[in-house]
Image: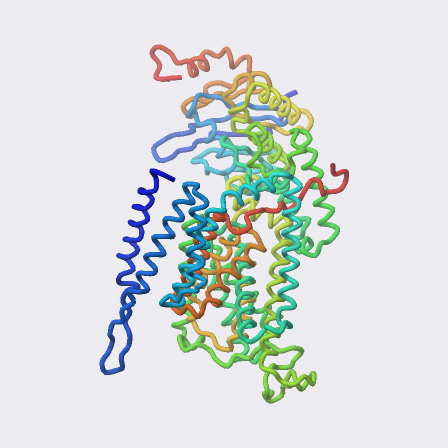
């Protein structure tokens, strides 16, 4: 089922912070309608790769090509353009919701660019034209759909900061999905979840892949999540790619086992 | 109360001692002018000092008792101070009456606060209480509006009251304008008065140099101020928090210094005078019309009265303030308004969602500046004379205080805070140089009792329940 054209093509990505080489010549591809997991020990450079893809860092060298209606060279785009035009959405390791705004408002903010166009840079909206009102109703319906999928319809008008931790994680994913992305980047979505919530997350991610047809890029430490749902796994260690392949293959790779468990003579400490 | 009492008395005595030591030079002596040749001399006010120190001793004791949960002794001490303040016995100065009386009120409020607060929280807990709060806030807004509309027609509305009303409404409008920048978009702007100055000078120059009328200049002044907002905002809006505050503070000062030093254009520190007032359908508010104009009394046949001009100004600023309010409320429900609030909450998350932070902040900054420009040209038309003196930093600080104390983002809160912070010092004018204490006291009380502002409740910009179709 692998398509010929990858959704995102990461080529020779290198990120240097002063003397520290955080990501060293990493290349991998992620396919559309697939879940690609990036794993590796702490400090392996996974989040740095994410920050390069989503425009929070400018890579020192390398090329990031996203294929949608045309080819987008992400390393040349400004931070917000990546979300706006290339349609790459992301979540954060430490949840970043808008805590003082309600759950529904969080999902409405995610549809900002679409609504901004419909409101004619606010002028139609100020005049209360039907064209804008219709767009707003449509946006609320999309939000309602996602609230149903993550089971938060009853909490729609509560401030997002009041939700329990697991619900906040799900809401952040729903908010990213409300931007109608091509590529969804999730930074440790299962961190801090209990086994039941973790299983629900697996369901949600599979439905995003199968139902919405969105490619998912996933950083995760929870191997039960990675091994169950990912189609392709990339392993990083000390900023380098040490293995790549289907999950069961990667699991048996001696280099990966060494990186995670350490060896008697090796410098790794797990 | 037993064993704690000696400790409390000792604490109160220590406080009184500190107050006496501080007050010895500040309150105890007063320099008086005894004629141009002899220079200055001292006047002793030790009686004032003694009363103040005793009041501080009793007040501190009352507050500590209230904190210990000894409600009745605290209430009695508060009542004693209140009665002394209300004044059967004559104290050395009017200020001391206020001082002692307010201290008594403060103790009583502090004693009753916990139970009142608990009742309030309980009322809010229930969802019925919450919707009642919401309906109450809406009613309160309409009542305030009705009061504001009929105020000039009331018999007590003399010149002084009307002046104060115009002043308060000007600050309400400025507060509503700044609320867009600070309350919604979360950009701490300490140089807001600069845009007020741009609006004022736009009207002053265009009317005195080119003879343009108030209504023609109003949009121009708003556009100019908004342009200034964009030009100043573009380089600085990538800064955050404190850094943005410092840079906007600097820009505010730069504009003021330019106004002082660019004498050819602005007439420097001497200011611009004889600015024409606003007209009503071409009629001026004056006893004798300038050549080519007619007066209001000629047009309508109503005999000339000095307060007509004030009433007219009052309704103009009321209208302008309401336009600001409606605009802000409307923008808040539009995508751009939601993006402002989202930027205030988390800028990084906004960027990840594809929102352009710079453009979004610039719109907030420019719109806030535009309303300051409107208010500025009103100010110039009302005063008929402006100089850089009117646009000093303390004005920015007062407007910011109104927004913060009112409750960031709350429109009614701004009105209440403006009435408190502008109205109180004016009402207490007979206290002389002590009147700014009323300003300080209002700020301290709000910060103690309502640390998140007078009205901290945030109304969501959109609700799922209310939204068609098929709301639950």
Q: Quadrant of residue B152?
A: bottom right
Q: Position of residue B253 (x, y in %)?
A: 40, 63
Q: Quadrant of the N terminus of chain A?
A: top right
Q: Is residue B148 above or below residue A55?
A: below
Q: Is residue A153 left or right of residue B60?
A: right
Q: Is residue B85 left or right of residue A84?
A: left
Residue B75 seen by the camera: yes
Q: Position of residue A52 (x, y in %)?
A: 48, 34
What residue is shown at x 27% (from left), y 69% (from top)?
Answer: B44
Q: Is residue B136 above or below residue B206?
A: above
Q: Position of residue B429 (x, y in %)?
A: 45, 69
Q: Nearer the viewer, residue A132 or A4?
A: A132
Q: Nearer the viewer, residue A237 or A112?
A: A112
Q: Position of residue B64 (x, y in %)?
A: 38, 45
Q: Quadrant of residue A172?
A: top right
**Farthest left residue in view:** B38
Q: How many marks?
A: 0
Residue B226 seen by the camera: no
Q: Quadrant of residue A3?
A: top right
**Farthest right residue in view:** B470
Q: Nearer the viewer, residue B270 or A238?
A: B270
Q: Nearer the viewer, residue B11 or B145?
A: B11
What residue is shown at x 45% (from left), y 44% (from top)?
Answer: B71
């Amino acid at each position: 089922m692998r398509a010929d054209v990858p959704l995102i093509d990461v080529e020779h990505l290198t990120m240097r912070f002063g003397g520290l080489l955080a990501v060293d010549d990493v290349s991998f591809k992620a396919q559309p309608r697939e879940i690609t997991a990036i794993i590796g020990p702490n400090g392996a450079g996974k989040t740095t790769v994410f920050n390069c893809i989503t425009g929070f860092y400018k890579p020192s060298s390398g090329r990031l090509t996203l294929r949608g209606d045309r080819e987008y060279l992400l390393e040349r785009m400004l931070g917000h353009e990546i979300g706006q035009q290339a349609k790459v959405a992301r979540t954060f390791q430490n949840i970043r919701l808008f805590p003082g705004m309600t759950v529904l408002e969080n999902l409405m903010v995610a549809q900002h660019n679409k609504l901004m166009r419909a409101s004619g840079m606010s002028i139609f909206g100020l005049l209360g034209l039907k064209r804008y009102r219709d767009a707003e109703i449509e946006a609320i319906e999309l939000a309602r759909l996602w609230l149903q999928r993550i089971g938060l319809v009853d909490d729609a008008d509560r401030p997002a900061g009041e939700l329990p931790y697991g619900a906040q994680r799900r809401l952040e994913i729903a908010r990213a999905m409300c931007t109608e992305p091509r590529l969804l980047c999730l930074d440790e979505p299962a961190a801090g979840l209990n086994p039941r919530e973790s299983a629900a997350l697996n369901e949600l991610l599979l439905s995003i892949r199968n139902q919405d047809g969105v490619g998912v890029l996933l950083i995760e430490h929870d191997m039960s999540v990675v091994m169950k749902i990912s189609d392709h796994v990339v392993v990083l260690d000390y900023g380098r790619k040490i293995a790549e392949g289907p999950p069961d293959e990667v699991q048996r790779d001696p280099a990966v086992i060494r990186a995670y468990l350490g060896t008697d003579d090796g410098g790794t400490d797990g | 109360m037993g064993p704690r009492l000696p400790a409390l008395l000792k604490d109160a005595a220590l406080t009184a001692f500190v107050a006496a030591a501080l007050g010895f030079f500040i309150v105890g002596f007063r320099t008086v002018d005894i004629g141009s040749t002899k220079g200055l001399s001292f006047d002793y006010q030790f009686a004032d000092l003694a009363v103040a120190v005793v009041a501080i001793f009793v007040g501190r004791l009352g507050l500590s008792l209230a904190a210990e949960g000894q409600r009745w002794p605290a209430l009695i001490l508060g009542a004693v101070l209140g009665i002394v303040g209300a004044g059967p016995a004559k104290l050395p100065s009017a200020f001391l009456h206020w001082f002692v009386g307010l201290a008594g009120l403060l103790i009583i409020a502090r004693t009753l606060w916990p139970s009142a607060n608990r009742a309030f929280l309980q009322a809010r807990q229930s969802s019925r209480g919450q919707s009642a709060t919401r309906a109450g806030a809406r009613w309160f807004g309409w009542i305030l509006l009705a009061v504001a509309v009929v105020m000039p027609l009331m018999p007590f509305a003399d010149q002084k009251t009307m002046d104060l009303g115009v002043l308060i409404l000007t600050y309400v409008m400025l507060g509503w304008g700044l609320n867009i920048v600070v309350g919604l978009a979360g950009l701490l702007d300490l140089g807001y008065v600069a845009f007020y100055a741009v609006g004022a000078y736009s009207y002053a120059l265009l009317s005195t140099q080119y003879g343009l009328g108030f209504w023609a200049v109003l949009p121009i002044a708003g556009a100019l101020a908004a342009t200034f907002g964009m030009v100043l905002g573009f380089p600085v809006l990538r800064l955050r928090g404190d850094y943005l505050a410092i840079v906007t503070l600097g820009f505010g000062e730069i504009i003021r210094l330019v106004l002082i030093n660019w004498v050819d254009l602005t007439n420097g520190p001497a200011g611009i005078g004889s600015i024409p007032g606003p007209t009503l359908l071409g009629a001026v508010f004056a006893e004798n019309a300038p050549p080519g104009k007619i007066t209001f009394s000629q047009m309508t046949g109503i005999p000339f009265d000095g307060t007509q001009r004030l009433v007219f100004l009052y309704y103009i600023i009321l209208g302008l303030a309401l336009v600001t309010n409606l605009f802000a409320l409307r923008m808040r429900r539009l995508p751009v308004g939601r993006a402002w609030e989202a930027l205030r909450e988390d800028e990084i998350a906004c960027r990840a969602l594809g929102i352009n932070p710079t453009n979004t902040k610039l719109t907030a900054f420019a719109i806030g500046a535009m309303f300051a420009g409107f208010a500025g040209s009103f100010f110039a038309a009302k005063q008929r004379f402006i100089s850089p003196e009117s646009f000093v930093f303390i004005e920015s600080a007062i407007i910011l205080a109104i927004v913060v104390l009112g409750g960031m983002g709350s429109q009614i809160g701004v009105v209440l805070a403006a009435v408190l912070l502008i109205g109180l010092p004016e009402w207490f004018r007979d206290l002389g140089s002590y009147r700014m204490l009323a300003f300080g006291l209002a700020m301290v009380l709000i910060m103690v009792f309502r640390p998140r502002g007078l009205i901290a409740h945030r109304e969501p910009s959109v609700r799922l329940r209310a939204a068609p179709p098929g709301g639950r």
